[in-house]
Every structure is written in structure tokens, then in C-alpha cells.
Amino acid sequence: MHWFLLILLLAGLYLLFNHNKWTYDWKCDHCNTIFEISWLTNRISPKRPPNMKLLRCPACHRISWAKEVKRIGNY
């Protein structure tokens, strides 16, 4: 019984930390590149309304306010 509860807890934590990774991407304000971020970056990066985060773009390497965009399709 304890193993079942532990597995259920771990599955819930996994879903909690990866929810945004499955549903949202981010769009660079400078070069319009769409990219994804890790759950850790999602938790610790500064954010401001509406739906923007201070992120480094993997394409142009600039740090800017990236916009959250809804992911279309499955990756």
C-alpha cells in the first residue's frame, strides 16, 4: 500500500512540474523564435503580467521578456 501512495505522489509531482511544458511555449520579443523552457526555469524566472517571463532566447541569446504562447499540436 505504501508503494502505491509513493508512486501516486511522484506521478502528481511530475504532472505539477511539467504542466506548462506540455501546454505552453515562449516567443522571443526580438527574433520571434518560439522555444520551450525547463520546469526549473519556469519556476524561478521573473514574470510579469500578462503572461510574460524574463528569459534568454536560445536563437539570438538575448535576455528579454518572452511572451507565453499556447502550444498547437503535440511534440
Image (cartoon, grey):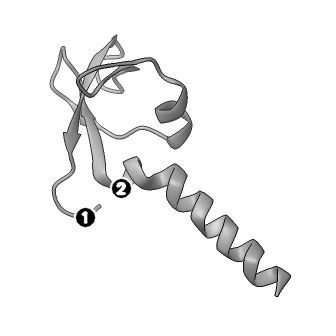
Place of residue 56 in the rendered image (x, y in percent of width and height, measured from the top left) = 39, 19
Q: Residue 33 occupies which quadrant of the picture? A: top left
Q: Residue 52: x percent and y percent?
A: 28, 23
Residue 47 in the image: above or below residue 3: above
Q: Amino acid at mark 2?
A: Trp
Which residue is under mark 2?
A: 22
Q: Residue at x 71, y 75 (%)?
A: 7
Image quarter hosting the N terminus: bottom right
Left or right: 42 as drawn, with respect to 49? right
**Mark 1 lies on residue:** 74
State the SS at label 1.
loop
Dot placed on the residue nearer the N-terminal end, 2 or 1: 2
Between residue 30 and residue 42, name the one nearer to us: 42
Residue plotted at (18% across, 14% down): 30
Image location (x, y in percent) of residue 63:
36, 11
Question: At label 1, which amino acid type do we have?
Answer: Asn
**Looking at the image, residue 64 lies above or below residue 25:** above
Residue at image location 42% in from the left, 38% down from the top = 37
